[in-house]
Image: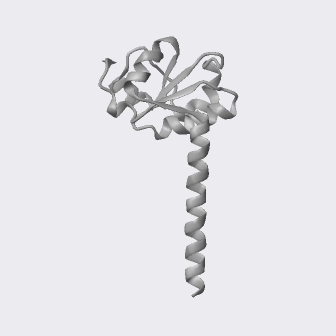
């Protein structure tokens, strides 16, 4: 019987953690469809947070590569007074990056829903 209480408490803790995480994410970043993303990314800072090998394999035209693994050292390369459009392969890394940037005082943060794997627009590959 005690094991059931421990398992229930663990599950409850996980549920609370995921709810709090999703709430924080919704406050930090606005998810955009591809059409919405295309409308605004030319007036914003377009940042690909994937690793350099992924970026070299293909990226959205006009994007610059600041990998999420280097964001703590390089975030000052991104202006806080202009909108920031982020994307990664499937939205997970860009979501974490958005939370980080929000903590650093960035307010206009947008993310491509579904990430680069859903992108059907123009790309550039090396």
Residue sitting nearer the eye, 64 or 12: 12
- Percent across and percent down for residue 72 are 63, 32
Q: Which residue is drawn at 60% across and 59% down?
A: 16
Q: In the image, is 102 to the left or to the right of 45?
A: right
- Percent across and percent down for residue 121 are 31, 20
Q: In the image, is 11 to the left or to the right of 60?
A: right
Locate residue 81: give its quadrant. top right
Relative height, residue 99 to residue 36 (above, below): below
Q: Which residue is drawn at 47% across and 41% down?
A: 92
Image quarter hosting the N terminus: bottom right
- Percent across and percent down for residue 45 are 53, 17
Residue sitting nearer the eye, 104 or 29: 29
Locate residue 122: give its quadrant. top left
Relative height, residue 87 to residue 61 (above, below): below
Residue that sits furthest to the bottom in the current view: 1
Residue that sits furthest to the top in the current view: 43
Q: Residue at x 63, y 17 (%)?
A: 79
Residue sitting nearer the eye, 105 or 124: 105
Q: Residue at x 60, y 79 (%)?
A: 5
In the rendered picture of this protein, how many numbered marks are placed on residues? 0
Locate residue 101: give its quadrant. top right
Image coloring type: one colour
Image quarter hosting the C terminus: top left
Residue sitting nearer the eye, 119 or 57: 119
- Percent across and percent down for residue 106 are 65, 26
Relative height, residue 108 to residue 8 (above, below): above
Residue that sits furthest to the left in the current view: 120
């Amino acid at each position: 019987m005690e094991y059931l209480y421990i398992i229930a408490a663990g599950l409850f803790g996980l549920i609370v953690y995921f709810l709090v995480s999703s709430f924080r994410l919704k406050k930090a970043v606005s998810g955009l469809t591809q059409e919405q993303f295309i409308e605004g990314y030319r007036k914003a800072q377009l940042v690909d947070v994937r690793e350099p090998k992924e970026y070299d394999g293909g990226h959205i035209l006009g994007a610059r590569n600041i990998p999420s693994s280097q964001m703590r050292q390089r975030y000052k390369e991104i202006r806080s007074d202009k909108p920031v459009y982020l994307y990664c392969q499937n939205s997970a890394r860009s979501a974490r990056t958005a939370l980080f940037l929000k903590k650093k005082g960035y307010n206009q943060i947008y993310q491509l829903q579904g990430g680069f794997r859903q992108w059907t627009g123009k790309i550039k590959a090396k």
